[in-house]
């Protein structure tokens, strides 16, 4: 059923109370996190969770991350071993998602874990997200608030662009500070499922060993693991020294300046925060028939998450 209008809610106590009331009624509310805007629904309500898949046009088999206000709340839904406790203590609240054994009999909608015996849990650092989660008082299932396969939203206006008329409301919290999605770690055995806002190097330092990457053998395939994802409309070329005719060139650092740049100074944190906004802007600039070329970005720290998203944006479309 199409909704007449998606409401923009202010980042005030009244706005957050309204957002929590919509969630309690089984509605969908997009809200800011430090990584990207999430498309939230009550994770114990099958109908609300099913509507999340419908609003995104997402294939049913992909499980969702549940968002909680703190570690104590997260323990109610997932089983934390000593390693998971240590990781949560080190990185929460923050852009790390832990894939853990699902606790039985909690009333979590089976759609959330898509039938798998694990659940992905995250305690976001954004104060508005934590405030909303506290007011709501339950787990909020939230994928990124964009149509499936498209560029993730880092502004309320991006959410409206993609999902207007498909969800009840968006809480407007301004731009997201981190700008790429959370790092996803399957905890036992430790396996990196998606590079993201917590650099892999920081996880390896905390674990005391290097991390294997992967997962289709032990974990469900993430949409972030599909070849083409985060795709703008214009074709994307990577590791470009300059823009050819018909290309919008996106620079990085002083060695590869561009009228459009991820970061003029070559700062990876700034580049991550700008990434999805710039993908959208470059897409608009490229226009009909145009293409986008990206300067190389180093494969260290947040550069790993940035390059992962850029490779998927550049992948052949399915
Ligand atoms: O930063 C983020 O993580 C954002 C914000 C809103 O929190 N959320 C986000 O959600 O990126 P989404 O749905 O776009 O990506 C979640 C990823 C998916 O690729 C999904 O397959 C994977 O997490 N995932 C969820 N549950 C899983 C599980 N039990 N095992 C393995 N992967 C899982
Ligand atoms: Mg996504």
Image (cartoon, grey):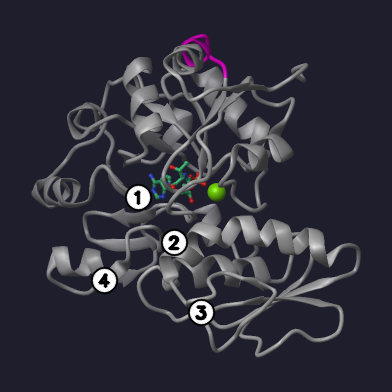
Q: Earlier in the sequence, mark 1 or mark 4?
A: 1
Query: Mark 1 or 2, which is nearer the eye?
Result: 1
Closer to the chain start, of discs 1 and 2, is: 1
4 and 2 marks in contact (CB < 8 Å): no
- Mark 3 and mark 1 lie on one chain; the one further toward the N terminus is 1
Residue 216 image label: 2
CB atoms at circles 1 and 4 under 8 Å apart? no
Q: CA distance from mark 2 to mark 3?
A: 27 Å
Q: Is residue 270 magenta?
A: no
Residue 318 is at least partly visible in this image: no
Locate residue 214, reporting x and y percent.
39, 67
Position above or below: 305 against 250: above
Q: Residue 312 is drawn in which quadrant?
A: bottom right
Quarter of the image with the C terminus is bottom right
- SS at badge 3: loop
Give the labeled residue for mark 4: 201
Which residue is more in the foreground, 28 or 155?
155
Q: Residue at x 45, y 33 (%)?
A: 112
Q: Earlier in the sequence, mark 4 or mark 2?
A: 4
Q: Secondary structure at mark 1?
A: loop
Label for residue 95?
A: 1
């Amino acid at each position: 059923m199409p909704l007449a209008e998606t409401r923009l809610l202010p980042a005030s106590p009244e706005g957050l109370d309204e957002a929590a009331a919509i969630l309690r009624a089984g509605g969908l509310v997009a809200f800011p996190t430090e990584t990207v805007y999430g498309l939230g629904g009550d994770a114990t309500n099958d109908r609300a969770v099913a509507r999340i898949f419908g609003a995104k046009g997402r294939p049913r088999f992909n499980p969702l991350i549940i968002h909680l206000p703190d570690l104590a709340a997260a323990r109610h839904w997932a089983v934390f071993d000593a390693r998971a406790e240590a990781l949560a203590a080190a990185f929460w609240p923050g852009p790390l998602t832990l894939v853990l054994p699902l606790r039985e009999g909690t009333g979590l909608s089976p759609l959330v874990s898509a039938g798998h015996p694990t659940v992905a849990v995250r305690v976001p650092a954004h104060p508005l997200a934590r405030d909303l989660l506290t007011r709501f008082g339950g787990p909020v299932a939230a994928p990124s608030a964009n149509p499936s396969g498209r560029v993730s939203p880092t502004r309320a206006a991006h959410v409206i662009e993609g999902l207007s008329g498909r969800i009840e409301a968006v809480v407007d919290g301004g731009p997201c500070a981190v700008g790429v999605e959370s790092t996803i770690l399957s905890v036992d055995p430790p396996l990196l499922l998606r590079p993201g806002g917590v650099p892999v190097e920081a996880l390896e330092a905390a674990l005391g060993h290097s991390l294997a990457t992967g997962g289709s053998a032990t974990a469900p395939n993430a949409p972030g693991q599909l070849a083409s994802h985060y795709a703008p409309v214009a074709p994307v070329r990577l590791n470009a020294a300059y823009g050819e005719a018909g290309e919008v060139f996106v620079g990085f650092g002083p060695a590869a300046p561009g009228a459009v740049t991820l970061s003029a100074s070559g700062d990876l944190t700034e580049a991550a925060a700008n990434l999805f906004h710039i993908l959208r802007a470059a897409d608009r600039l490229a226009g009909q028939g145009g293409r986008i070329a990206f300067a190389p970005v180093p494969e260290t720290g947040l550069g790993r998450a940035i390059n992962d998203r850029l490779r998927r944006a550049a992948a052949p479309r399915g």
